[in-house]
Image (cartoon, rainbow, N blue to C red):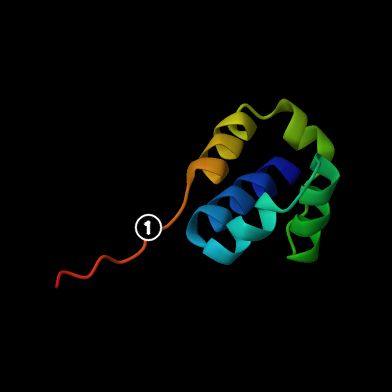
Amino acid sequence: MARYEFKKFIIAAKRNLSLRKRIKQCQQAEDVIYLAKELGFNIINKDLEEDHLLSDFNTWIHKSKISPIKKNI
């Protein structure tokens, strides 16, 4: 059940800029787990340690950003 919750959390982060910002502020895995639980996702440390998506997720979170809108004058 927790692994399913972890995947739902990843999907939520991909779709939500403010959640990505909050995740970037997390200093360690426990902070991410606390944030997820605060938002209603039931994930555990084992999910973070074992899931190969974690490295992809971390890479994606740190590389993702929204570019400013460019105005053509």
User: Which residue is pictured at 67% across the width and 30% down the height?
Assistant: 51
Q: Which residue is mark 1?
A: 67
Residue 43, above or below 70: above
Residue 37 in the image, given as x and y percentages of width and height: 80, 59
- 5 or 54, nearer to the observer: 54
User: Which residue is pictured at 61% across the width and 38% down the height?
Assistant: 58
- 34 or 64, nearer to the observer: 64
Residue 47 in the image, given as x and y percentages of width and height: 75, 36
- 69 or 45, nearer to the observer: 69
Question: The N terminus lies in which quarter of the figure?
Answer: top right
User: Which residue is pictured at 59% across the width and 48% down the height?
Assistant: 10
Residue occupying the far left of the picture = 73
Q: Amino acid at mark 1?
A: Ser
Residue 1 visible in the shown view: no
Question: The C terminus lies in which quarter of the figure?
Answer: bottom left
Residue 18 in the image, given as x and y percentages of width and height: 59, 66
Residue occupying the far front of the picture = 73
Residue 50, by quadrant, is top right
User: Which residue is pictured at 85% across the width and 45% down the height?
Assistant: 30
Relative side of 30 to 56, left or right: right
Residue 69 visible in the shown view: yes
- 38 or 69, nearer to the observer: 69
- Number of marks: 1
Mark 1, residues whose alpha carbon is within 10 Å: few (<14), some, or many (≥20)? few
Residue 43 in the image, given as x and y percentages of width and height: 77, 47
Q: Secondary structure at mark 1?
A: loop
